[in-house]
Image (tube, grey):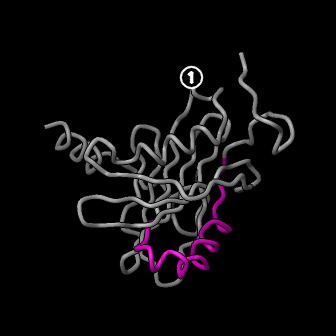
Amino acid sequence: MRAALGFFVCVVGCAPAWHPAAPGRLQLVVPDGWTVTRNYRAFGADTVVLDRDQASISLSVRPDSGRGRRLPIDLVAGVRALSWGARVGVENALIAEHDIELDGRRACAVTGIRRWRTATIGYTMIYSRATDRSVELVLHAPLDQLDGQAADWATFLGGFHLDVPLPVEGPLFEDDSWRR
């Protein structure tokens, strides 16, 4: 019932999250050969999903407030990556974690493996923050194809721009500390 209601609300009232070649809350570049399969804005969150063959790229920009904003960005990225799908039995393992810059903002990139039943897939997730938003970009592909998606992933990341002011913080990569 709840899923049906969400679908109904989105069909009736969801605006596109991204408009090609038009100013908006976010801009992105769709790499050649990729197709936009989802593009909607609902309840203040923007979601865009691109697919090609067995790979997908997803982008989610959600309102973010509260105590979680005080947690270190790498901690949040790791928890988000490891908890994805856990309720339905998806097993996640982290392989690497790096601090990077995304659209002039500090971000954390996490690479790992997800297993569900007999399927195993590789992923790279990037988590960042804007003033009042959290940003999550994810590339999923079969393990043997993950490295082959690097050029398109770089095109997507290079063309991503969020029209939200940068957070007022210290240097881009200052040491995280637990704030009171």
| Quarter occupied by residue 34 | bottom left
Residue 126 to residue 78: above or below = below
| Quarter occupied by residue 27 | bottom right
Residue nearer the viewer, 168 or 175: 175
Residue 83 forms part of the magenta stretch:
no
Amino acid on which disc 1 is placed: Gly
Residue 1 to residue 104: above or below = above
169 vs 120, left or right, is right
| Quarter occupied by residue 164 | top right
Residue nearer the viewer, 140 or 36: 140
Residue nearer the viewer, 131 or 123: 123
Disc 1: which residue: 66
In the rendered image, the residue lying farthest to the top is: 180
Residue nearer the viewer, 23 or 75: 75
x, y (%) of residue 173?
A: 81, 44
Q: Main secondary structure of the magenta part?
A: helix
Query: Are there few (<14), some (14-19), or many (20+) residues within 10 Å of tag 1?
Result: few
x, y (%) of residue 151?
A: 61, 79
Residue 142 forms part of the magenta stretch:
yes
Could you tell me which residue is drawn at 63 percent across and 29 percent down?
71
x, y (%) of residue 37?
A: 36, 67
x, y (%) of residue 59?
A: 50, 56
Could you tell me which residue is drawn at 42 percent across and 69 percent down?
56
Could you tell me which residue is drawn at 20 percent across and 42 percent down?
3
The residues colored magenta run: 140-163
Residue 168 to residue 66: above or below = below
Of the 4 image quadrants, the one containing the C terminus is: top right
Could you tell me which residue is drawn at 85 percent across and 35 percent down?
170
Helix, strand or loop at disc 1?
loop
7 vs 164, left or right, is left
